[in-house]
Amino acid sequence: MYKTLLVEKSGRIATLSLNRPEAMNSMNEVMMMELAEFFESIKQDTSIQVLLLKGEGRVFSAGGDVKAMLDTENPFNIEEAMEYVSRIALALYTLPQLTIASVHGAAAGLGFSLVLGCDIIIAEENSKLAMNFSGIGLVPDGGGHFFLKERVGIPKAKQIMWSGQLFNGKEAKAVGLVDEVASDGLGWATATSYAQKLLESATASLIASKEILHAGQIKELEMILQKEAVTQSTLRKSVDHKEGITAFVEKRKPAFKGE
């Protein structure tokens, strides 16, 4: 059904796996479109109460597909991409399911925004989490501003976004970015165990509390998504962004000019 995702359902649990392991599960336009479609469709599936998210291969997700941004033969459509990531964030935040992200390896940029949009985050000790959009001259998207602010508050969110700091699992837990830390290789087992505990609870009441807590924040999320889309589209044309992605591919430090 999907080209870049794997979906499995077992009883009241569904598992979503990002499935571009050869590209470190980086998100191209196809994956963005499919994620939007998946989250919007599972909103209608009342038989599922817990949704688990993970990445196939060595990492959760390296974020947006930087190489696709440099492809001159098939130009990256930033406006279309922003429409997809906005749909992803809004659908994820309003899901009538409890969501658990299991992070191993890297969860960076848009991949980290996806993780932060989940209700529960479990990261392995040596996972690498970073909101590193500033390194390529862009701003967080996929609701990154909103989800990060919800997790750690505005002052800390600014520090994390501006610095592009890389956190391992323990460091991320210490600042409130993740909820549980698992030993390397045991993240997925920890996540599935957590899911079973949720199903042994009065799950419908947990989902109802989530809906009540999120209801008042939806308009703010929509506003932030709109601002992210407009800003990202503008910055995509900037000198610093072009330098940032070129430096990323060339594996060197970018020489930004503030333009």
Image (tube, rainbow, N blue to C red):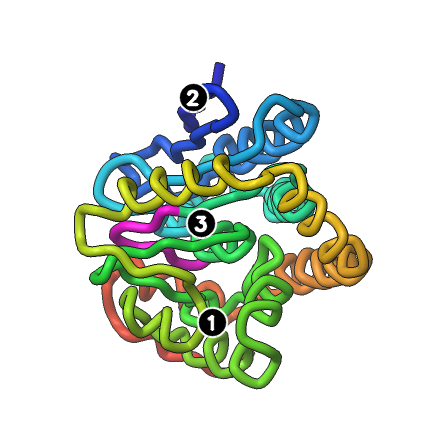
In the displayed structure, 177 sits above or below 46; it is: below
Q: Are marks 2 and 3 in contact (CB under 8 Å)?
A: no
2 or 3: tag closer to the N-terminus:
2
Mark 2–mark 1 contact, CB under 8 Å? no
User: For the residue marked with disc 2, what is the amino acid?
Assistant: Glu
Q: What's under tag 1, amino acid-wise?
A: Ser
Q: Secondary structure at mark 2?
A: strand
In the image, taking residue 102 as reference, residue 153 lies left or right, namely right
Circle nearer the N terminus (3, 1): 3
As drawn, which residue projects farthest toward the top? 1
Q: Residue 243's x, y, as percent?
A: 41, 68
Amino acid on which the number 3 mark rests in the picture: Gly
Is 198 part of what is drawn in magenta? no
Disc 3 designates what residue? 64
Q: Is residue 79 visible?
A: no
* Secondary structure of the residue carrying numbered label 3: loop
Q: State whether residue 13 appears in this view.
A: yes
Instruction: Please state the extent of the stretch shown in magenta in the rendering.
Output: 102-109
Question: Quadrant of the rendered structure where residue 194 is?
Answer: top left
Location of residue 147 in the rendering, given as x and y in whole percent from the top left corner: 59, 62
Residue where numbered disc 1 is placed: 134
Upstream in the sequence, badge 2 or badge 1?
A: 2
In this view, the residue in front, 229 or 214, is 214
- CA gap, disc 3 to disc 1? 13 Å
Q: Position of residue 32 (x, y in %)?
A: 54, 37
